[in-house]
């Protein structure tokens, strides 16, 4: 079987606007992306899993495979994910369709989907996810930007607060982890 890096690089060259990164995320980022998942109730959805760096870490947090659904638009990555993670639901569908997969009360969304400077994708991916998440659910987003990947204006439009959880230097390139939560009224 080719290495994750080889599969990732191959797909990055074929579909650069979707894959965006040059290598799978490091274990250090995966640990910060999945922090606290052991305390979260309900289904967990990972969007844009690629070759599964975060998937592996989610399962290592003790999440049962049956609770985890992956939404990945690249069919080559989906095939890799199915082989590596038996028992996990792998959907070859865009994250924009999260309202149509039959899940509600989602406890956490772990996102590798590139949202930075893409307002339409922010509305379609983050906005729609919030509608099927539990009231106190967490949307965890990786970005390479030092600041929040969604603007203050977009935060207001979506009704979310944004917390910076981590900067991880041990990644190529260095990564940041942000958490979006619905503002409670
Ligand atoms: C930067 S890579 C991250 C991969 C993996 N999470 C990691 O950190 O190694 C972005 C991933 O998101 C996927 N992707 C991009 N847009 C997507 C969308 N709208 N819905 C689902 N997956 C998407 C790409 O195919 C790719 O696997």
Image: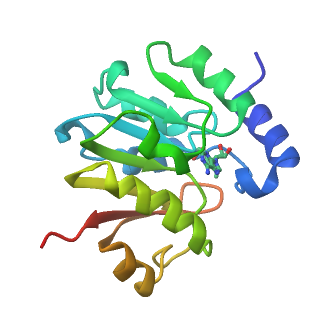
Number of numbered discs on residues: 0
In this view, which residue lies farthest toward the right?
14
Q: Is residue 153 above or below residue 168?
A: below
* Residue drawn where x is 60% and y is 24% of the image: 81
Residue 164 % position (x, y): 35, 70
Quadrant in which the C terminus is drawn: bottom left
Viewer-closest of 156 and 9: 156
Which quadrant of the view contains residue 48?
A: top right
Which color scheme is applied?
A: rainbow
In this view, which residue lies farthest toward the left?
185
Q: Is residue 24 left or right of residue 101?
A: right
Residue 70 % position (x, y): 50, 33
Quadrant in which the N terminus is drawn: top right
* Residue drawn where x is 35% and y is 19% of the image: 66
* Residue drawn where x is 44% and y is 35% of the image: 101
Q: Is residue 148 left or right of residue 3?
A: left
Residue 13 % position (x, y): 87, 47
Q: Is residue 130 above or below residue 158?
A: above
Q: Is residue 15 left or right of residue 70?
A: right
* Residue drawn where x is 56% and y is 39% of the image: 49
Which quadrant of the view contains residue 9?
A: top right
Residue 165 % position (x, y): 34, 64
Q: Is residue 144 visible?
A: no
Q: Is residue 94 above or below residue 167?
A: above
């Amino acid at each position: 079987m080719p290495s994750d890096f080889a599969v990732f690089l191959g797909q990055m060259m074929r579909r650069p606007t979707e894959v965006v990164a040059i290598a799978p995320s490091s274990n250090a980022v995966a640990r910060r992306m999945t922090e606290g998942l052991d305390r979260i109730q309900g289904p967990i959805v990972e969007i844009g899993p690629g070759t599964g760096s975060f998937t592996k870490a989610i399962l290592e947090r003790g999440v049962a495979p049956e609770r985890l659904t992956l939404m990945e638009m690249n069919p080559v990555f989906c095939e890799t994910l199915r082989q590596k993670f038996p028992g996990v639901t792998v959907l070859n569908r865009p994250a924009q369709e999260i309202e149509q997969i039959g899940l509600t009360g989602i406890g956490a969304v772990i996102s590798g989907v590139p949202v930075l400077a893409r307002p339409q994708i922010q509305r379609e991916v983050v906005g729609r996810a919030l509608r099927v998440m539990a009231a106190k659910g967490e949307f965890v987003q990786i970005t390479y930007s030092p600041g929040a990947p969604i603007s203050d204006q977009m935060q207001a439009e979506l009704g979310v607060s944004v917390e910076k959880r981590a900067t991880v230097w041990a990644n190529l390139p260095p990564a940041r982890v942000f958490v979006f939560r619905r503002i409670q009224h």
